[in-house]
Image (cartoon, coloured by chain):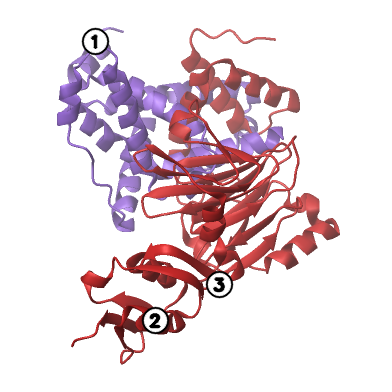
Chain colours: A red, B purple
Amino acid sequence: MSMAFENSDDAVAYWVARIDAGDLTPEETARWQMWLDEDPSHRGKLLRTQAIWMSLSQTEDQAAPEDEAPVRAPLWQRRSFLGGAAAAGLAAVGGAYFLLDRDQTFSTRKGEVRRVPLIDGSAMTMNSDTGVSVRMERNRRMVSLARGEAWFEVAKDPARPFVVNAGNMVTRAVGTAFSVRRHENAVEVMVTEGVVETWSPDRADQRLRLKAGQRVVATDSAIIHYRPSQSEQVERALAWRTGEIDLAGNTLADAAEEFNRYNTRQLLIADPEISGEQIAGVFRMNDPMGFAEAVKASLDLKVDISDPTVIRLERKTR
Amino acid sequence: MANTELERHLRMSLWVAKEILPHESRIRGWFRRNRISPEDTDELLQEAYCRLATIDAFEAIASPPAYFFSIARNLLAKKLRRPQVVSIESFSEIDSTIQFDNDDMEDAAHLRHASAKLRGLIAGLPDRCRRIVELRKIEGWSQKEIASHLGITEKAVEKQVWLGVRAIREAWERKARPGNMAAERLERVVP
């Protein structure tokens, strides 16, 4: 059956009123979805009109659907309620249905690297200071990276693509392994296995396919820099998964920044002249002091540890 | 799956109501200052809402108004690249951003302001419609409760809500264009 409305604005208002009644039958819901798909403008118009209608009653929490999802960051600040493994275990024991369609959030503190098995058989390894929410839907697996970096080993399930949203980037995989990292003004995707597809929601028609060993960086201005790279480099950039920082000719400044991601005691390069020096080697990420000692010897530097919060590196005064 | 979609729609609408709607007038102001016509602005914002509606992880967006604004601005840039309306040079002269304060107090003020503005619009509704919208939105009654209270059918209540939604949206759009006083007056004169 079709509804006759003079224009789409009337149809939009009809659906807002109908949804407001709160008793849509499954048939009507299906009809609603058909209407949404009929014209790309319908979703936008409905969203805005529904929001205007909801604003009318916004005395704080009223009008919220039962369990309102977090609107802002605070959730990330909370430590995840259970270890990931425990959560997944719980889910397996019959809570699976309960967890379907519900966001689970996970976070790590600075210096913490954690591997979290997901309910679908995938696994996610979270880097230091990372916030992720996961939502398993019947036709797709949705992950949002609020901050930080995570590496995903995706269990194969062609019927349910695995989609990671981070900033201005969407990355989709079916069964593969890849990492997504949020930088200050950019998002970086690296593929370690298989193929993923990545795009910006603003330009959903321009999709990029990445194969193992490739990486892409998208900045906030939505310009995509495509940098083919050696898979060896990708593996090296993901050394954090085993608690290591793997440097191959990175500058001292980059290396310091990397260590500072994981440690509260910060490396400080006090001498701009040495910040461009290149470093190679594998270091333990939680041992900035060991790193400082190593470069002290090889670059002939002075290490000042008089301040307990800082490790200061500078050139030896002769 | 269907319910999930509906639940998501409601969650996102609430998010738009809180995070974006209160900033709409400032965003319009930016387009106005850059000499984009109100019609073009409407079209751009409408399209920006369409883009927004397709974003899955909307809750993870750090600064929703800034994000929304950047979508609208990209759409404008795209539009200007086509041989229409304005030349490219004029776009490069457009100053690039509006400051969106991260200050919660500021946001709360915008939100209150927008809510107050919207509530003011209820007063302008025809009597029967206004009564029902007030019961629904201010008293927080369900459509069903209103129907039994007024002794009318639920469909009748829904019809009034439909009229209310339409009228409020139109009034909100009219208010969004301060330059349109003349048009508003004209509409009042012509029945």
Residue nearest the viewer, comparing A46 with A163:
A163
Residue that appears at 62% across and 67% down: A114
Q: Is residue A272 left or right of residue B64?
A: left
Which disc, if any, is residue A112?
3
- Is residue A154 at least partly visible in the picture? yes
The residue shown at (44%, 48%) is A187
**The C terminus of chain A, quarter of image:** bottom left
Q: Position of residue B122 (x, y in %)?
A: 39, 31
Q: Chain of mark 2?
A: A
Quote the CA–CA distance across marks 3 and 1: 68 Å
**Residue A217 sits above or below residue A317 on the image:** above
**Place of residue A102 in the rendered image (x, y in percent of width and height, measured from the top left):** 67, 50
Mark in the foreground, 3 or 1: 3
Q: Comparing marks 1 and 2, which lies closer to the viewer?
A: 2
Q: Residue at x 60, y 20 (%)?
A: A37
- The x, y position of residue A79, in whole percent, is 57, 69
Chain to which the residue tagged by mark 1 belongs: B
Is A139 left or right of B181, judged from the image as shown?
right
Q: Amino acid at mark 1?
A: Val
The residue beneath circle 1 is: B189
Residue furthest out toward the bottom: A306
